[in-house]
Amino acid sequence: TVAPQTRKFEAEVAQVLHLVTHSLYSHKEIFLRELISNASDACDKLRFEAIANPSLSEGDADLHVDITFDADARTLTLRDNGIGMSRDEVIENIGTIARSGTRKFLESLSGDSRKDTQLIGQFGVGFYSAFIVADKVTLVTRRAGADASEGVKWESDGTGEYTISAVADAPRGTSVTLHLKEDESEFLNRWTLRSLVSKYSDHIAFPIRLPKEEEGKLTDEFETVNHVAALWTRPKSELKDEDYQSFYKALSHDFNDAASWTHNRVEGNQSYTVLLYLPSKPPFDAMFSGRDERKGLKLYIRRVFIMDASEQLLPAYLRFMRGVVDSDDLPLNVSREILQDNRLVAQIRSACIKRSLDLLEKLANDDAEKFQAFIDSFGNVLKEGIAEDAANRERIAKLLRFASTRSEGQTRTVSLDDYIGRMVAGQEAIYYVSADSFAAAKGSPQIEALRSRGIEVLLMIDRIDEWMLGYLNEYNGKRLRNAAKGDIDLTAIAGGDDKDAREAAAKAAEPVVARLKELLGERVKDVRISQRLTDSPSCLVLDEYDMALHLQRLMREAGH
Ligand code: ADP
Ligand code: MG
């Protein structure tokens, strides 16, 4: 055997540990949810690996999570008979933070503990939450399939180091023992533990067991205290809002309630269940990880967890959605490659898109405040859908909100339908102008004439807008037009135009125009008399098909 080794945590781990223990105290109960969720993940993984390699179950396929405590020793132990970990896996999983967004997460902390707590909640603290209530944690584990002598013991007080040593006869799976801090005795109580399991972990699909109580005494026998059925398999009529919310929180590690959800069983040429949640706050990974490391939609096949399949089941512009898909018909040995190119998966994917858009539409109609919060957090993500999902373009466009010359402040509140409802007599197009900021857009000289005629102009002030507008030429039969491009004909519009006066003014200005052309020479394509302006003497205008000024500037900044 190898002698016990003391090792240092990765710098990020030490930082996260410090943060967790100091800022999450008011949410301390979540440690139990996190540890149960790890135990349940470990059972999921064993069940999945045993599909290809049945010997891994070692004749013990009855997976469960046992919670015991010892009031005298002040310890609380969670034991699962799931997949377990090898020594390398313990070092990799518990001693480092594998998640790629961790550094960005740490950089984004503000020092304001209220905001940070929120962020840490969205980040999902996982295993380290044990140190909120424990001053020492001992983990003993053995990987399924490994020899009984290949057990591993990991121990740490959660400050900067841990020790790791070999264990001669560890059972398969993992036990985590918390040595509780002085004032955390409340968790050494069956009733408390039982109610925490009901509150946070009732939906776990494996039995969570506590020692049986007989005549006020705990026995050596165990009793299952959760529902055991995976939440999405239970009839909707049996489920309360609280059940959905607590499942959402466990699924997403979010502290906040979900904004809404949709739960459906589909039976037909293929059968599956979809449970999708719309978060109310941006989940950590939707904010910080790239579009290619998306997570949040779990694929189950006949109740067996297979993998996170967000990329296969949802397009990138819906990456804020969270949930579960459980298919009856896909083969258990499905791989990512098969998922990528499978007819059944394609059907499920379009159902997920449809349900997500349904949820958003419903929220927009029923709860303006929540919908606005959604737009503030995810509006720009949704805009990607205009380019990416031609089939649903009109539905997505309907959900978008913009700032406009009519809206107050910079919040994006104006929908294209609102805009169309306010179009003036004779107006045929939806006008917009794009700029780097709200002030610059609103003050654009190119829109003076439109504004003076009472015509609303949408203000495109987000980086993604110009790209998106390249795919959104029309909405509801109305063209979208850049007010800074090409000729704008205002003759048909109410309060429009005095042709004689315009021609007289043009005539009078001819010498000025000629002089300007001479002076500006090659630097401009043309100098024209404009209908756009009321107060400013001149403005820059692009030809209809030129790249927007503000996009030209972005391209220059990017070195093009
Ligand atoms: P997450 O569960 O989000 O990956 P955690 O901090 O909760 O993050 O856990 C880190 C990793 O440690 C897990 O991904 C898993 O690989 C490993 N782990 C934790 N608990 C267990 C367990 N009971 N059995 C097996 N592996 C575990
Ligand atoms: Mg976890």
Image (cartoon, rainbow, N blue to C red):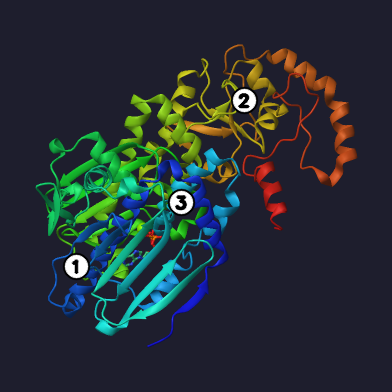
Whichever of callouts 1 and 2 sits on the residue coming sooner in the sequence is: 1
Q: Amino acid at mark 2?
A: Asp
Farthest residue to the front: give it: 72
Label 1 close to label 3 by CB (< 8 Å) = no
Drawn side of residue 304 relative to residue 260, left or right: left
Taking depth in this image into account, of 253 and 532 the one nearest to the observer is 253
Judged from the image, the quadrant occupied by ligand 1 is bottom left
- Residue assigned mark 1: 332
The x and y percentages for residue 224 are 14, 53
The x and y percentages for residue 164 are 43, 76
| Label 1, label 2: how far apart the Cα atoms are | 62 Å
Position of the C terminus, as image quadrant, is: bottom right
Whichever of callouts 1 and 3 sits on the residue coming sooner in the sequence is: 3
Residue 254 visible at all:
yes
Residue 313 visible at all:
no
User: Considering the numbered disc 3 on the image, is that residue within a helix, a strand or a loop?
Assistant: helix
The x and y percentages for residue 402 are 53, 31
Taking depth in this image into account, of 385 and 253 the one nearest to the observer is 253
Quadrant assignment, res 196:
top left
- Residue assigned mark 3: 123
Q: Amino acid at mark 1?
A: Leu
Reply above or below: 23 against 502.
below
Whichever of callouts 2 and 3 sits on the residue coming sooner in the sequence is: 3
| Label 1, label 3: how far apart the Cα atoms are | 30 Å
Drawn side of residue 292 relative to residue 272, left or right: right
Quadrant assignment, res 515:
top right
Label 1 close to label 2 by CB (< 8 Å) = no
Res. 489 mark: 2
User: Considering the numbered disc 1 on the image, is that residue within a helix, a strand or a loop?
Assistant: loop
Drawn side of residue 155 relative to residue 244, left or right: right
